Amino acid sequence: MNKNNYIILYFLLAIGITFRFLPHTANFVPIGAIAIFSGLYFPKKYAIIIPVIALIISDFFIGFYSWQIMLSVYGSFVIMGLLGLLARKNKSFGKIAGATILGSLIFFLITNASVWIFGTMYSHSISGLIESYYMALPFFKNSLMGDIFYTFILVGTTESVLYYQNKKSTKQSINI
């Protein structure tokens, strides 16, 4: 990785950490988008660790909670990074959108199952599981909208910069 990639990496970490402290609509944060973005543009190990590092640092200040539920949250973002890696191959709008939506859905399914299994809010029955998913629908909507919004911003900005850099270098090579 070059110097510019490290600057972007630290910028993403700063965004991921900072936005968890700023007032926001529940679950409307950029961590999922950072995971997708990292998978699209960074080597594999960074795609997996960037969102986890942002979560660990911010959780250190916000507070840790049930390790089983935390593991499901962290693991869900690792999966989103892996989805970004998959979308990197023959990158297209459809693949990136699909990875983002699928990542949000996987996060919803895994984390709410974890709250049901390891928490005390819902009865440990099928009706309790259904209730946990039902009660989490507003959070899913916010996660999905946040992931789409922030992925659009991060990927759209990056692809625009890459497009104009490529256009500029092509134009310069023609003039030489």
Image (cartoon, rainbow, N blue to C red):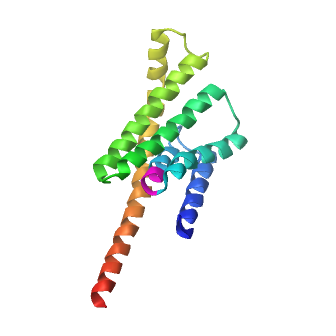
> Can residue 148 be seen from the camera position used here?
no
Does the magenta segment cover residue 70?
A: no
Camera-side residue of 26 and 34: 34
Q: Residue 64: image x %, image y %?
A: 69, 34
Query: In front: 174, or 16?
Result: 174
Q: Residue at the spot x=54%, y=68% of the render?
A: 2
Q: Is 167 in front, or is 62? A: 167
State the extent of the magenta-drawn residues as a range.
Answer: 37-41
Could you tell whether 14 is left or right of 126 in the image?
right
Residue 124 lies, with reference to residue 162, above or below; the image says: above
Q: If the image is split into quadrants, where does the C terminus sit? A: bottom left
How many numbered marks are there?
0
Q: Is residue 62 visible?
A: yes
Which residue is at 43% across, 37% downward? 104
Apparent side of residue 176 relative to residue 6 in the rendered image (left or right): left
Residue 48 at x, y percent in the picture: 53, 45
Percent position of residue 103, x then y: 42, 38
Q: Main secondary structure of the magenta part?
A: helix
- In which image quadrant can residue 12 be found? bottom right
Return the x and y of residue 106 as percentages of the image width and height.
Answer: 43, 32
Position of residue 169 relative to residue 124, above or below, is below
Q: Left of 52 or right of it: where is 88?
A: left
On screen, 39 above or below 80? below
From the viewer's perspective, is residue 113 above or below residue 17? above
Residue in the image at 44% along x and 57% along y: 41
State the residue at coordinates (61%, 56%): 14
Q: Is 40 inside the magenta-drawn segment?
A: yes
